Image (cartoon, grey):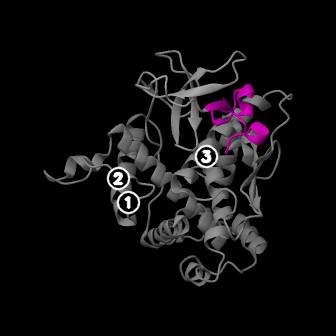
Amino acid sequence: MKNFACSACGVRVYFDNGLCIACGRSLGFDADTLSLAALEPVGQDGSLFRKIRIGQSGKEAVVEVRYCENAMHGACNWLVPHDAPGGLCKACACNRTIPNLSEAGRLDAWREVENAKKRLVYSLLRFGLPLDGGIEHSGTPLTFDFMARAVTGHINGVITLDVLEADAVERERRRQFLDEPYRSLLGHLRHESGHYYWMLLVDRDAVIEEFRSVFGDERQDYQAALSAYYTDGAPPNWAENHVSAYASAHPWEDWAETWAHYLHMVDAVETAEAEGMEPRAAGLLFGAAWPFKKYDVYQQVSFDSLMERWVPLSLAMNNISRSLGHHDFYPFVISAGARAKLALVHRLVRDGIR
């Protein structure tokens, strides 16, 4: 994720901040500009604000905004137009079900889930991917059901997530039980969103045969394939063609796992560039354009360039993690087979936003 600055005082602020600790201004995320805006109250009731820009004159038009209704629960810092129907931001409007907040621990769990979901939606908006299904699937918007003791999954545009996984102990228990070394809330949401965008980007005549040539035939029995995976595990050579063991279960899961890893890569590379910590910079010849010239990794970078940046970054993160006494931060090796799948995801995302 890129860095943000308070639009009133210029001090660095972060994606989920609701207040600038330097100048005391309220902050809100503007999904239309993908930026954090400093706010000042308009009127007496304290619910309406105008966005502040450094150097802004009082003669400029006042565009009134409010916080998303879920701000009252401490679960959202996104902004909506003052007259937006329903009062929910672009991300929260995707929710169909939230936990029963009167139950002990549910509010904190939902806040954790919402934070992860906001990061997913940020990435989707940065890509320019539709949240409403697009033209061909306009009746199938991206939808979320967040419930306790639910089965995490996707069906017909609805992503269900068990909010109990917001508890670190429970998530670790499941991680070890299922032998999934990279289990996280954001990882879940990215994976399940892959199933949604498979419907939009892949399941059409112009693409499906190419998908089958790279990922395999998704028409094989899905339930039987999952049953076999959970009974027998992944084949011994799974790493030759898949980004993870679970990706070997079925072509649909292969796509969703590859999609999730692609989103991991893009977001991490953008963050590393924003923080000025890309390790490849040390090996560049004098006068090289990159990294001194920045590129929008969501829109401008080729797949080969993305990989050239991701591999040394992931190796550096792993070494830093080991130096601090932890396991690899990114415990995967991208084989030639997995790389070809990631390349197809990259191209279909670019084709989809065009």
Residue picked out by circle 3: 186
Q: Which of 5 and 48 lies nearest the eye of the viewer?
A: 48
Q: Residue furthest left?
A: 286
Q: Which of 267 and 254 lies nearest the eye of the viewer?
A: 267
Q: Secondary structure at mark 1?
A: loop
Taking 280 as reference, is 300 above or below it? below
The Cα–Cα distance between marks 3 and 2, rounded to whole angstroms, is 25 Å
State left or right for residue 111 relative to residue 14: right
Q: Secondary structure at mark 2?
A: loop
Could you tell which of marks 3 and 1 lies nearer the N-terminus? 3
Taking 161 as reference, is 100 above or below it? above
Quadrant in which residue 115 is drawn = top right
The disc at residue 301 is 1
Taking 149 as reference, is 55 above or below it? above
The disc at residue 295 is 2
The residue mark sitting in front, 3 or 1, is: 1
The residue mark sitting in front, 3 or 2, is: 2
The magenta segment: 64-90
Amino acid type shown at disc 3: Leu
- Residue drawn where x is 70% and y is 23% of the image: 47
The Cα–Cα distance between marks 3 and 1, rounded to whole angstroms, is 23 Å
Amino acid type shown at disc 2: Tyr
Q: Are discs 3 and 2 less than 8 Å apart at CB?
A: no
> Residue 276, position in %: x, y?
32, 39
Could you tell which of marks 2 and 1 lies nearer the N-terminus? 2
The disc at residue 91 is none
> Residue 328, position in %: x, y?
46, 46
State left or right for residue 221 relative to residue 305: right
